[in-house]
Image (spheres, grey):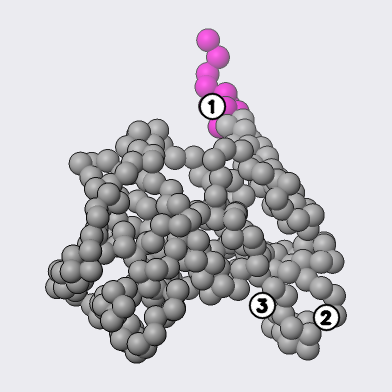
Amino acid sequence: MTNVASSSDKTPSFEKTWGSSTSSGYCSEEEADSEFEQYFTARTSFFPQTRKANVNANVKQDEHTEWEKQELNTADYQQKVKEYNAQINSNLFMNMNKDGSYTGFIKVQFKLVRPVSVPPPKKGGHDARGRKASGVKRRTSFYLPKDASKHLHISSRTSAREVIEALLKKFTVVDNPGKFALFERSERHDQVYVRKVSDDEHPLRLRLCAGPNEKVLSFVLKENETGEVNWHAFSMPELKNFLLILKREEEEHVKQIVQRYALARTKMREALAGSTPG
């Protein structure tokens, strides 16, 4: 990726240059019955996998870091930009602007549990399976690949909310940005700390103050929820698709259980047949 940070003297609220460590492609499932939407999924399960207790025990929530409290002036930022650029081994440099702001790159990892929705193909165009689009209004929902990530070129004035909106725009996601939140993740003393970044915070400032080390600070995009899923926030076609996924999961679990008991029954009968009375 070429360095575009110095390509413009006028720095807007944010400017984007995209890089990707993984594809945003998706795999097709069986066709949904809904006439309004098509769904594609790269996941095999609707529910998130249960994490091991010892992993959760090492995760701390809402821990504030030292760099969030730093008060810096323009000279401090200039020095930190020089120190930051000296530590990186790529061309993803930060650059100071004449107005005292600066631009640079942040990497955001996606850890989404639920599918996202994208617009339908234009009339006369083709959908994800190469079929000619009909006149029926449709939406396509799919799961982003696990651990997908994107590099985003932003300004020091870019807020966390603008980062979320820019990422969704990149994937042409039409879901309400309020469904998502940006989190910062850091590893210190064998502990993992996770904190929700407020909408008006500036992620590039956090990146600069923390340095380029991803273990010290990394950004994660997740669903914005604090407890139970708010099913009322989803459209009727989305909910119908979730029910289809649940039905398929249930059928698969039932099939596995039946096979497990059938195998156990067969082994018991073989043992009985091979044993001698008395």
Q: Given the image, on which type of amino acid does mark 3 rest?
A: Ala
Side of 254 relative to 86 (left or right):
right
Q: What residue is shown at x 64% (from left), y 62% (from top)?
A: 175
Query: Mark 3 highlights which residue?
Result: 128
- Helix, strand or loop at mark 1: helix
As for residue 271 lying within the magenta part, the answer is yes
Q: CA distance from mark 3 to mark 2?
A: 13 Å
Residue 21 visible (yes or no) = no
Q: Which residues are magenta?
A: 266-278
Q: Are marks 3 and 1 in contact (CB under 8 Å)?
A: no
Query: Mark 1 highlights which residue?
Result: 271
Q: CA distance from mark 3 to mark 1?
A: 53 Å
Q: What residue is shown at x 31% (from left), y 62% (from top)?
A: 205
Camera-near label (1 vs 2) is: 2
Magenta region, main secondary structure: helix
When the figure is inspected, residue 15 is found, relative to residue 149, above or below; the finding is: below
Decide which of 47, 247 is in the foreground and name it: 47
